[in-house]
Amino acid sequence: MSSLFKKIDQWWSKIPTICSKLISMRNVTQRQQTRSDITKLWNTPAHLINRNPTYETLLYHVSEPLAFITFNRPEKLNTISPLMPSELQHSIIRANQDNSVKIIILRGNGTSFCAGFDFSNDLANLPSNLSNSIHDWNPGEDMILTTSKLTSPIAKFMSIWYSHKPVIAQIHGYCVGGGSDMALCADLIIAADDTIIGTPYSRVWGAYLTGMWIYRLGLTKCKELALSGEALTGKRAAEINLINKSVPFNQLEDEVLKTGEKLAQIPVTQLATMKLMVNQVYENQGLHTTQLLGCILDGSMRHTPEAMQFVETAARFGVQQAVKQRDAPFQDYSQADEKNRPNINHKFSYQQGKIKSKL
C-alpha cells in the first residue's frame, strides 16, 4: 500500500511539469497561428507569388538587356484599376532582380499610355473609400490608405523612382491625371508629338500626388499649370522640359529602343549610382513630404462641395457628362477639337515590342 502512495506522489509531483509543457505547446501553436495570420494579411496577391506570374493589367517581357512593362487595358485607355499599382510594383522588382536586365521600358498598349484612374461604371471601380460618398467617407481611413507605403498606389508608383535600374517611359495618346503622376516618376520620358499630358484634376476632385510636376518644372511654369490644369501636347511638354524628348509617333518605339540600348552599354552599378545621386537631391528637398501632403489634400479635394457635385453628376448622368462639364470652359481633354486630340490611329501593340535587342 505504501508503494502505491509513493507512486501516486511521484505522479502528482510531475503534474506541474506536464501542465507547464502543455501550456508551452499551446502558446507555440498560438504564436504559429498568429504568425500565419499576419503573413496572410501582408501577403502579395496570390497570382503574384509565382516565379513567372500572369499579370491581369500588364504584360512583362524581357529581351536582354531590356525589360518591357506594357499596361494592357487598352479598352479602358489603360486607366488605373486597384490592382494595377501592385502589378506595376511587382514587375519593377522582378526586373531589378533579373541580372540580364539593365534598362526598363514602361509603355501602354492601344491608343494611350494611361488616362488616369479608372472612373468607369460611374466611379464604381474605385476602392470603396475613394468612391467619394459623403456619408461613408472616413478621413482617417483615407489618410492611411493613401499615405501608407504598404497600401498607397502612389507608394507603388514610386517603385519606378526607387528602381536602381533606369526606367524609360514611352508615352503616347493620353497621359493624364494619375497616369502623368506615374509617368513622371521615370528617369527618362519620351513622348509622341501628339500625346496629351496634363492634370485635369487641378480643376476639381484632386491634387498633385507624386509631386513630380513640381520638381520637374520649377516654380514659374508649374504654378501656371497647377492652377489651370492646362493640357499639353508631347511636343510642348518637351519644349518646357517637363519630359526629355518628343518625336513623331512612327518614330517613338525606335527612339525609345535606341535610347535604352545606348544606356545598356553602361555598367548597371554606374547607372544606379548616378540615378541615386540625382534622386537624392530631390529627396533632400522634401519630395516625400510633398507626396504625403499631396495625398492628404487629394482626399480633401474629393470632398469639397464642387467635388461632390462632380460625383453626383457622374452618378446621375454618367462620368462622361461630369467630365464634359469640367472640360467645357477650357475646350481641352474630352472637349478638345479633333486637331487637339491624339490621333486615334496611333495605336501601340505588344507585338511591336517583340524586337530583339541589337546588343
Image (cartoon, rainbow, N blue to C red):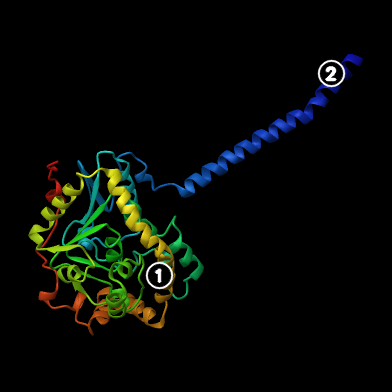
Front residue of 333/198: it is: 198
Of 176 and 53, the residue lying toward us: 176
Mark 2 to mark 1 CA distance (whole Å): 75 Å
The amino acid type found where label 2 is placed reads: Lys
First in sequence: mark 2 or mark 1? 2
- Please state which of residues 335 and 169 is positioned toward the viewer in this rendering: 169
Image quarter of residue 124: bottom left
Query: Does 4 sit above or below residue 254?
Result: above
Q: According to the image, label 2 marks what residue?
A: 7
Q: Position of residue 134 (x, y in %)?
A: 45, 76
Marks 2 and 1: which is nearer the front? 1
Query: Does dot 2 land on a helix, a strand or a loop?
Result: helix
Residue neighbourhood size for the residue with mark 2, other residues' Cα within 10 Å, grouped as few (<14), some (14–19), many (≥20): few
Residue 153 can be seen, yes or no? no
Neighbor class of circle 1 (other Cα within 10 Å; few <14, some 14-19, many 20+) is many
Residue with the mark numbered 1: 294
Residue 213 visible in the shown view: yes
Q: Looking at the image, which residue sits at the far right?
A: 2
Q: Amino acid at mark 1?
A: Gly
Residue furthest bottom in the image: 329
